[in-house]
Image (cartoon, grey):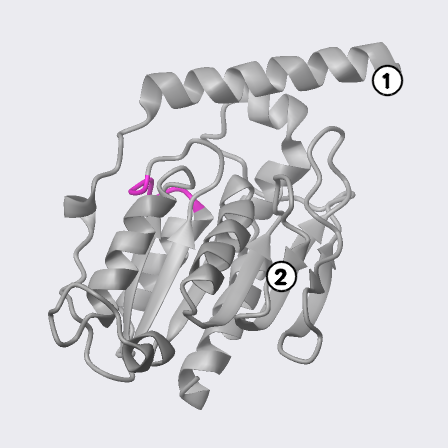
Amino acid sequence: MSKRCATLALMLSLVLVLLSGCLFSTGQRYRHFSTATPLPDRQFLVLGFMGGREAWDNHKNGVRKLALKLRAMPLPAAVETVENTKRELALQLIDKALDRDGDSRLSSQERQSAQIILYGQSFGGAAVVKLARQLQKRQIPVLLTVQIDSVGLGDAVIPSNVRRAANLFQKNGLIIRGEPRIRPQDPAKTTIIGNFRFDYKGKKIDLTGIPWHKKLFRSAHAKMDRDPEVWAKVESLIMEVVKSGG
């Protein structure tokens, strides 16, 4: 494909993403969260960020599927999914979850008691890093971040309030490829578990129900969202932290 054709394809893909967001976004609100706040001490808060302009309750999306699976397990955790443009809702939930004395402000003890795990796919992967930076400014720690084929600006450097971070990506995409390498802002404070590459050359993944434009321009990116191996890896990373108690 020529450089001009690739540029045109990218522009068309971005237009389609924006149109799909305008036409189909549900506009998530705080009332859509089911988590009762404040959370008990030592309970985890797991937030999954949706990709593209996917609605928070899209059950076909890998982020949402994993969240529902984790909810069904007997874990000491509250699990929610968030649209990647709605980080302010996630911040509201975190504030309410940690405010155990109900004074509408977080003490140092309340902030440091946070047991937060963040994961996200595509634009949701970038949202994970952006939210972690916002929490860094509030002096709230994050136990784990997981990015899945992360797409966005500034999503490669993990802030120092994050204890562990993992990155899953693919390089088969003609137009969209995830961030290939994350690195810590402070290696003494953040452990990069790994940058895990998934190869979709010749790998068959069921893309039933995926819109034609995603199959045409973002096939590998779409395959990663539907790949059971990807979500099994994400689940294992999350479960390792939960089972260890943080």
Determine crowd level at label 1: few under 14, some 14-19, many 20+ residues with C-alpha closer than 10 A.
few
Considering every residue shown, the one lying at the far bottom of the view is 244
Q: Main secondary structure of the magenta part?
A: loop
Residue at position x 56%, y 42% from top? 122
Of 184 and 214, the residue lying toward us: 184
Q: Which mark is residue 158?
A: 2
Q: Which mark is residue 1?
A: 1
Determine crowd level at label 2: few under 14, some 14-19, many 20+ residues with C-alpha closer than 10 A.
many
Above or below residue 63? Residue 6 is: above
- Across and down, in percent, residue 129 comes to 54, 54
Residue at position x 13%, y 76% from top? 101
Above or below residue 157? Residue 27 is: above
Q: Reading the chain from its start, which is encountered first: label 2 or label 1? A: 1
Of 56 and 144, the residue lying toward us: 144
Q: Which residues are magenta?
A: 56-61
Q: Nearer the viewer, mark 2 or mark 1?
A: 2
The amino acid type found where label 1 is placed reads Met
Above or below residue 56? Residue 183 is: below
The amino acid type found where label 2 is placed reads Ile
